[in-house]
Image: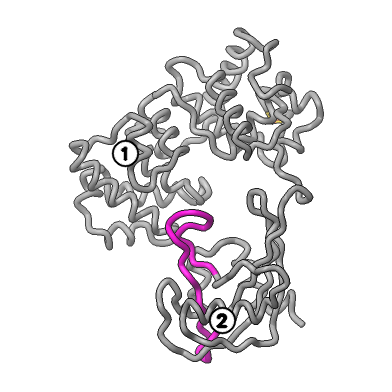
Amino acid sequence: MPNSVPIAMTGPWYEDVTQELLNWFSANARDLPWRCHYTPYEIWVSEIMLQQTQMLRVVGYFRHFMSRFPTLQALAHANLEEVLSAWEGLGYYRRAKSLHETARLVMTQYGGVLPSDQEKLEALPGIGHYTAAAIAAIAFEQPTVGVDANVVRVLTRLFDYPEDVRSVTGKTCIERFARTLLPRGQARAFNQALMELGALICGRKPLCTDCPWQKRCLAHAHGSESQRPVQPSPAQRQLRSVTAGLIVDSQRRLVLCQRPNHGIWANLWALPEFTLQSNADPVAYFSTCFARQTGLSVRALHWHTELRHAYTKWQILLQARAYCLESVDLPKPFAWFAACDVAHVPVPSPHRTLLERFFDRKAGRN
Ligand code: SF4
């Protein structure tokens, strides 16, 4: 398959593919509270809630939030504590702060009306490239497509796209596939239909027999569904070693470190970790780096474990060790958390696994 829209599949093929998708969506769309009125405010709030949170969890929170703040004006006039309280339990509180900040900005900059233009939306706090496209399409019928992981999966399979979708070429190509299928004047239905197909049918284990594209899908025809989308193979990934610390005090508290508001794991609370220089001893290196950042000395304990995880082109080897530290005040961005509170704090998934191992003492113990 070339890095462009297949030449043989012209005009009617695309129209038929799109129509089959829209027909399927109209018969199978889930009944969701933000699909009643399609107000820009409701679509915006739902898209922000759906970032990093599963659809079924979001429904109840969305209803509750709307009952507290039924309009953008009500949200803008609320104080931040009220907004955070309505968000409680949903996690990733940075999203609630951005919603509140954006509501106030929209009041002052746009007279209380969310802009329909994708670029203007993307310039607002908490709204990234995908979210701006999704709001522009679903709330305003702007001719654009929000390409998220669901959409990437569906389109790479439909076109049996064999390249790395994280490359610049891959991203450009997937966006081109999406725009080519986008029907005039139906961005709202099309965007939701693509996402819904990815969520309900074309998941990690695709249910091809229930799929409206079963007869057209090239990956299904070639038997390559499970290999799409193509990700860098472990062999192609570069290895990076990281030394992480589970630092505890005598009161069973644990040190976490808040990540910056950009880059990997933005705003989450992570274990302190440092990328290892080649051949460095993980324990000595961790102690030195932590002391350099905080002015505090930790003492290594016996417990340790290690974990591998992949991130974009990296294969990360996390070498974790327990340390103890006196109960002292910590400089930002470090903070103490009671062991019983750690479960309620947003923590990156590999670090969550380390924490579970540490508290369970079941795996990785020696
Ligand atoms: S036929 Fe299968 S692989 Fe192809 S789009 Fe449908 S569910 Fe996905």
Q: In which quarter of the image is residue 219?
A: top right
Q: Mark 1 points at which residue?
A: 41
Front residue of 151/207: it is: 151
Whole-percent x, y for residue 80 in the image = 27, 59
Q: Does the magenta stretch include residue 282?
A: no
| Rendered image: mark on residue 284 | none
Of the four image quadrants, the one with ligand 1 is: top right
Image-based side of 114 in relation to 304, left or right: left
* 84 w.r.t. 44: above or below: below
| Rendered image: mark on residue 247 | 2
Question: Which residues fall within the magenta stretch?
Answer: 248-270
Q: Look at discs 2 and 1 and give the one toward the viewer.
A: 2
Q: Does the magenta stretch include residue 267?
A: yes
Mark 1 lies within 8 Å of ligand 1 (Cβ measured):
no
Mark 2 / mark 1, whichever is N-terminal: 1
Front residue of 272/89: it is: 272
Front residue of 180/76: it is: 180
Under circle 2, the secondary element is strand
Which amino acid, mark 2?
A: Ile
Q: Residue at coordinates 67% horizontally, 76% vertically from top-left? A: 282
Quadrant including the N terminus: top right
